[in-house]
Image: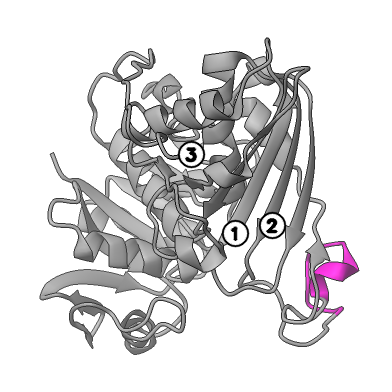
Amino acid sequence: MTVTIGINGLGRIGRSLTRIVAAAPNPGVEIVAVNDLASTEKLAYGLRRDSIRGAFPGTVSSRGDQLVVNDRTIRAFHHERPERIPWAEEGVDVVIEATGRFRAGTAARSHITHGGARKVVISASADDPDAFLVYGANHLSYDPDLHDVVSPASCGVNALTVMAKVLLDRFGLSSVNTSVMLAAQGWQRVQDSLVGNSREDPRLGRAVGESIVPHNYVVGDLVRVALPEIGEMRYSYYCVPTPVGSLAELSGQTRRPVTIEEVNRAMAEAAAGPLRGVLAYDPDPTVSIDVKNNSASCLFDPSGTQTTASGGVKVRGWFDNEWGFSNRLLDLARLVGERLPVPSSRMNWSVVEDLVSNQ
């Protein structure tokens, strides 16, 4: 079945979602409505021209209250509050809440109670959703009877969690430390601005292109929500002045000492098997721009793997914080919108002999 999608907020994530669906031959979803405060003409322009992604690979125009994307029409609403958006008029199954403003489960739920949608996926680390579902880690714990408003946490959480999942399943994992270096965000400022910013830390108002900015974001807590077996975690988080491409590093302790080759092989097997499409593996030396437009949650970098004789391990992965995360949002939208039984959560490992043979 095709899941019908409504997007609230056609910003960086909303436009990425639209581009991904428009380019996919069989996306399994159809965007039938969007809501944004910008005019329909400006929404069309924002899809046609993008400073990071380039020109839209197709056609986009506006016609009254409709966007026309590759000859398919999308209804455009312009309501400030989610409870005023009539999603049911367009037959929306799942709303992707992508404004960044309505992260609370109660606010997002109004897409259902007032708008007539069936499910909501919040494109952020939400407050009190029915469930945090990190695709590839714990998404098969989705319960259609209990989970109407779900969150995939954040792009950094997704990148860290898929690497942690492989280490946990194959070697055991504890005493975890994480670090995320995140590319420039839309809420950051070109010049220093200490007013008009709802974030309490004044450093987050500093000029985006001039500094590495520490960010007190509790990324480790949400990795632990997806993988509670890990236990307590420590974390650090920084915003860095790159336009696209982010980095996640994770270190911890395995049940027994492991070699670099064992770790890299486990990641390669996961990327080719049970985590195909969610985890990617690239044997080439990579830098941040190399992950641009990569649809995986994490592009594993085997050159960053370190191990110790006492069981210490450290791994590194890149992620396109908009593009990979948008693909996971669509994965979740398909999952919660399909009205089908959820399959077993057991992970079946395949063996891939050649991906790490040259490491």
Residue that extends furthest to the front in the rendered view of this protein: 358
Q: Which mark, by number, is residue 246?
A: 1
Residue type at mark 3: give it. Gln
Q: Which of marks 2 and 3 is in front?
A: 3
Task: Name the secondary structure under disc 1.
Answer: strand
Residue receiving disc 2? 181
Taking the spot 42% from the left edge, 39% from the top edge, the residue there is 358
Where is residue 256 shown, x and y percent of the image?
68, 10
Q: Cα distance, mark 2 to mark 3?
A: 25 Å
Residue 143 picture quarter: top left
79 lies left or right of 251: left
Check disc 3: other Cα within 10 Å, few if <14, some if 14-19, many if 20+: few
Does residue 117 sit above or below 37 in this rendering?
above
359 lies left or right of 210: left
Q: Nearer the viewer, residue 353 or 89?
A: 353
The residue range painted magenta reads 194-205
Taking the spot 60% from the left edge, 61% from the top edge, the residue there is 101
Task: Name the secondary structure under disc 3.
Answer: loop
Where is residue 241 shown, x and y percent of the image?
69, 74
Residues at circles 1 and 2 in contact by the CB criterion of under 8 Å: yes
Where is residue 164 shown, x and y percent of the image?
59, 29
Residue receiving disc 3? 359
